[in-house]
């Protein structure tokens, strides 16, 4: 682990920049809500909850776009904040306060969105006499903790869990990328076991259901934030289904525990050098115990956000050990990834790297840096798939994107 002044200085930078949206959120009005607001009788309101709002959010087509209307039923709330991933601007939270149809229990807020949008969302109501839970936090981490613990939409069955494990609802518009491998359906299921990895780090091992012939070695996936992908989201289920469908061949997965939020901030910081743990300790340890291929082309490191930054550094700094990187919404604000393609950084053979780099169009801090990085990596000779999905910094998107990335890396 690097030590000294450089690490101490960089490690103090622990939060992404709170940059305002480059433009206002696409707030609009719902024709159905406007019509109800003209005659908000008790009968009309009850009919609204029984029919139009029976399943939420409400969708109304408007040209090539869709008006997406979120509703919350609450006669007692003084305010309701709608927290939609990367539509809600944390520097201007008042813009995300829901409107109330006067004299009713209907709170609403509408956005005009493209038909391929997907996002997680939650509601945070405030009642008389209570402090405002989404304000008064100068600490970004505390603010996010408050926002990430909102309530699910009781009229929407689709959900996911965020990094904290809190359940959130999910809106998926008709043309959002399909996610066919999320729910368990494979007849043959692999084995997921928890073991003590190098340094006594909690580690999960996914072994595919398909038997491995004697002497045969198969690819391995090194998955960061393993505690998320073995609880909040089930990567084992996705792998079972993909292998069962023939979308990918059998593969082992080594899922590494981050060790908690504070430990994650430290170890996934570029100055720490967690890539050395992966290449010098974890990979040799796994190969000694499981039939894993020695070929770097059969090794894929997977991460999201800070984990994606670490995955990129691992692949580009150690192309002789890791041939593939699946990076989702990498925290490029923390490190100038352009430096990864410079010889002084140690990258001597980027042409041997295959990188699946994806980022949401709603991630206004990250989208442009990802575009620049993709261009520089290609210029350095790397084989790069740069994907932009209509969404945010969001497991609702990443849980499907991880499967798309595996298909490209392992089968193309």
Image (cartoon, helix red, strand yellow):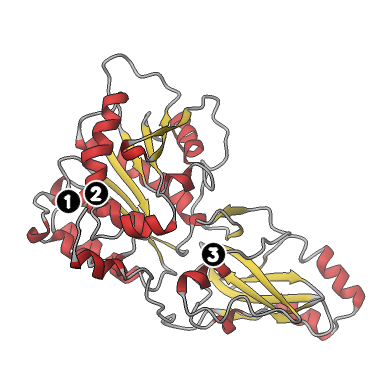
Q: Is residue 358 left or right of residue 159?
A: left
Tell me which corner region of the image, top left, top right, bottom left or bottom right, holds residue 410.
Answer: top left
Depth check, front residue: 12 or 280: 12
Badge 2: residue crowd in 10 Å (few <14, some 14–19, many ≥20): many
Give the spatial CA distance, label 3 vs label 2. Answer: 39 Å
| Element type at mark 2 | helix
State the image coordinates of residue 398 (x, y, percent, origin top left): 45, 53
State the image coordinates of residue 262 (x, y, percent, origin top left): 41, 59
Q: Are marks 1 and 3 in contact (CB under 8 Å)?
A: no
Kindly tell me whether residue 411 is visible in this rendering: no
Decide which of tag 1 and tag 3 comes sooner along the chain: 3
State the image coordinates of residue 231 (x, y, percent, origin top left): 53, 44
Between circles 3 and 2, the one closer to the viewer is 2
Q: Which residue is mark 1?
A: 317
Q: Which mark is residue 393?
A: none
Q: Are marks 2 and 1 in contact (CB under 8 Å)?
A: yes
Between circles 1 and 3, the one closer to the viewer is 1
Tell me which corner region of the image, top left, top right, bottom left or bottom right, holds residue 50.
Answer: bottom right
Q: Is residue 399 left or right of residue 290?
A: right
**Is residue 266 placed above or below 324 in the rendered structure?**
below
């Amino acid at each position: 682990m690097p030590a000294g002044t450089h690490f101490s200085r960089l490690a103090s930078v622990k939060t992404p920049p709170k940059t305002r949206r480059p433009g206002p959120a696409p707030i609009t009005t719902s024709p159905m809500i406007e019509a109800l607001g003209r005659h908000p009788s008790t009968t009309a309101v009850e009919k609204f909850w029984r029919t139009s709002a029976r399943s939420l959010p409400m969708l109304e087509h408007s040209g090539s776009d869709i008006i997406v209307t979120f509703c919350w039923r609450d006669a007692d709330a003084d305010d309701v904040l709608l927290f939609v991933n990367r539509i809600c601007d944390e520097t201007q939270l008042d813009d995300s306060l829901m409107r109330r149809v006067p004299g009713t229990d209907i709170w609403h807020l509408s956005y005009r969105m493209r038909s391929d949008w997907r996002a997680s969302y939650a509601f945070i109501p405030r009642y008389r006499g209570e402090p405002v839970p989404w304000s008064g936090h100068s600490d970004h981490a505390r603010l996010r903790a408050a926002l990430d613990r909102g309530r699910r939409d009781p009229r929407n069955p689709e959900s996911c869990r965020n990094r904290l494990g809190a359940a959130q609802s999910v809106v998926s518009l008709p043309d959002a990328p399909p996610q066919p491998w999320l729910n368990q359906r494979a007849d043959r299921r692999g084995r997921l076991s928890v073991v003590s990895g190098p340094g006594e780090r909690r580690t999960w091992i996914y072994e595919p259901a398909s038997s491995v012939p004697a002497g045969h070695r198969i690819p391995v996936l090194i998955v960061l934030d393993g505690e998320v992908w073995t609880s909040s989201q089930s990567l084992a289920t996705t792998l079972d289904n993909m292998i069962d469908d023939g979308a990918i061949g059998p593969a082992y997965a080594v899922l590494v525990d981050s060790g908690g939020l504070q430990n994650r901030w430290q170890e996934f910081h570029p100055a720490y050098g967690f890539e050395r743990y992966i290449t010098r300790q974890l990979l040799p340890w796994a190969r000694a115990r499981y039939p894993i291929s020695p070929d770097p082309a059969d090794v894929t490191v997977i991460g999201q956000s800070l984990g994606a930054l670490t995955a990129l550094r691992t692949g580009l700094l150690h192309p002789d050990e890791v041939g593939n990187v699946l990076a989702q919404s990498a925290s490029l604000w923390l490190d100038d990834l352009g430096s990864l393609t410079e010889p002084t950084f140690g990258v001597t053979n980027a042409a041997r790297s295959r990188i699946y780099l994806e980022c949401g169009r709603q991630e206004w801090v990250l989208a442009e840096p990802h575009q620049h990085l993709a261009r520089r990596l290609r210029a350095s000779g790397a084989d790069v798939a740069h994907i932009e999905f209509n969404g945010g910094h969001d497991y609702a998107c990443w849980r499907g994107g991880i499967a798309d990335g595996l298909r490209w890396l392992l089968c193309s």
